Image: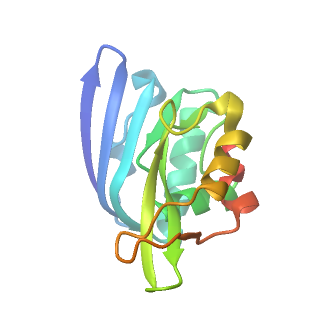
Amino acid sequence: MKVDIEKTEQGTKVTLTGRITEDSDFGLMPSKDDAPLVIDMQNVTRINSCGLRFWVIWMNDLGKDTQVTLQNCPQWVVDQINILEGFVGNNTVVESFYVPYYCEDCELSESVFKKQGVDFELNNVDAAIQDWEDQPPKCPQCSGDMDLDAVSSKYFSFLK
């Protein structure tokens, strides 16, 4: 895992790249003294069970109330947030993430980007989810409606 850290007036921006594994050096990660933290997950390619363990320990060391914002979360990150207690703290906000869609006609899988303040508001998540279900994206290959490639009530549970 490569860790790029940029100090800003608003806090600390962390860009992670590569795989989070037993070889990842979490000593390179910022501490709660560097908060608020903004973590870009876009270029993280995978995480294994040891990487998950180290991630949860690091989040726990930050403290439950440390302000953390996650950006550009791929599906596997959303899945971990939903199923693994401790993957995020009490004061973690997922600012942006990808939603998996599938076209049955041409068998294309596509991830659609969603961002808070643009595609949804935290105080009106249910309405946004309903809109995403009622107005699915068009397939870029055949122009047909794509289907959500997840169980809506489970996939979006991290937003509630």
Residue 79 image-quadrant placement? bottom right
Instruction: Residue at 30%, 13% (x, y): give it.
Output: 9
Instruction: Residue at 32%, 32% (x, y): give it.
Output: 13
Q: What x and y, as percent, mark residue 110?
A: 42, 69
Please state if 66 lies on the left or on the right of 23 as rendered: right
Instruction: Residue at 43%, 30% (x, y): give it.
Output: 37
In the foreground, 86 or 15: 15
In the foreground, 6 or 158: 158
Please state if 149 lies on the left or on the right of 8 as rendered: right
In the foreground, 103 or 39: 103
Q: How many labels does the image show?
A: 0
Q: What x and y, as percent, mark residue 90?
A: 67, 34
Q: What x and y, as percent, mark residue 53?
A: 55, 60
Q: In the rendered image, is residue 84 in sight?
A: no
Please say which color scheme the image uses: rainbow
Pick out the residue farthest to the top: 9
For the C terminus, the quadrant is top right
Q: In the rendered image, is residue 36 in sight?
A: yes
For the N terminus, the quadrant is bottom left
Q: What x and y, as percent, mark residue 153?
A: 75, 59
| Above/below status of 9 relative to 23 | above
Pick out the residue farthest to the front: 143
| Above/below status of 52 relative to 36 | below
Instruction: Residue at 44%, 22% (x, y): give it.
Output: 33
